[in-house]
Amino acid sequence: MAEKAKYEFRRFDDRSLSSTEASWKRQLSKHSSEVIPTEYERKLAWAREHATYGKDEEIFAYGVFRDGGLIASAIVDVVYTKAGRKWLKLLDINLTPDLDLSFNSDKPDLDAIGDVFTAAITGVIALGAVHPAKETKLYGRSGTLLSFLKGLGAHLNGDGGKLIRGKIEVLMEGRWLVFRRKSK
Amino acid sequence: MNVIQFDVGIHNLLSDHEWNQVIGEAVAYALAELGDDVYKLDWANSLARHQEQVKAAA
């Protein structure tokens, strides 16, 4: 049995940006009959623009990388607002074209998609160590991600929430899945 | 006495290991729900496989 891939949420640098751009463009050319590349190209350009992580920044591009590699399996949009009430938000998880387009097939790569989502969500929550916030919010931009977040929330509010019960409240607010620290 | 620490983010309320466990398990169920919602494929196998992987990684 093949060893399970490990996915890691981390910052982009010049090398990983260039490798991701080249790989995603190769994948897009493979799927040219199924997809208009503009959306992915726009996201790649956005990632390059927001791959700076200075203390004054509020919008960040993070990647989910497989097995320590340089090609992102997803570009994750993260916002940390500093003024007023502090929020840490995951605005979108943009899957690599191969994974994204597997949804159109009979066999979406669920194992990989689950691992990428797990890495993105735990990664954003872990950013709370650097950017403390009473709330971390995950936005269901696409119908797919929204369904997924609803399922996540439902499980965490049921049997899956034992570890967080009494500490963290999990709720859906519109298209947002919200993790909110409980006040005592 | 309870002390409210306003600068403590939710991340600090659980260990990294606990977060991985909580989210990993929930993701497996969310994927099953998503599949049920949209695809009507054989999600039970995928869910079981994913749960095994989550347990193995924990």
Image (spheres, coloured by chain):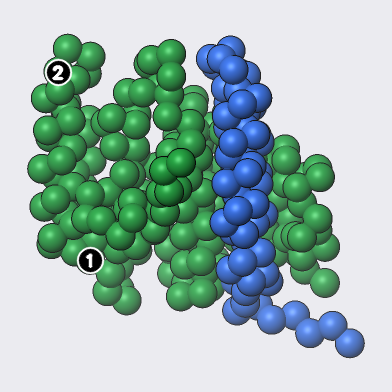
Q: Is residue A52 above or below residue A79?
A: below
Amino acid on which the number 1 mark rests in the picture = Thr
In the image, A62 versus A70, the foreground residue is A70
Which residue is the extreme one toward the front?
A1
Q: Which chain is blue?
A: B
In the image, A147 versus B47, the foreground residue is B47
Q: Which chain is green?
A: A
On the question of residue A94 being in view, the answer is yes
Q: CA distance from mark 2 to mark 1?
A: 31 Å
Report the side of B38 relative to A69 (left or right). Answer: right
Q: Is residue A136 above or below residue A20?
A: below
Residue beneath the point at 51% across and 66% down: A126
Mark 2 burial class by Cα count in 10 Å: few <14, some 14-19, many 20+: few
Amino acid on which the number 2 mark rests in the picture = Ser
Residue beneath the point at 15% across and 23% down: A30
Report the side of B3 relative to A21 (left or right). Answer: right
- x, y percentage for residue A71? 22, 49
Q: Is residue A165 above or below residue B42?
A: below
Query: Mark 2 — on which chain does it sit?
Result: A
Report the side of A125 relative to A24 (left or right). Answer: right
- x, y percentage for residue A18? 11, 52
- x, y percentage for residue A91? 43, 46
Which residue is the extreme one toward the right?
B1
Residue beneath the point at 19% across and 20% down: A31
On the question of residue A77 being in view, the answer is no
Disc 1 designates what residue? A52
Judged from the image, the secondary structure of the residue bearing numbered disc 2 is loop
Disc 2 designates what residue? A32
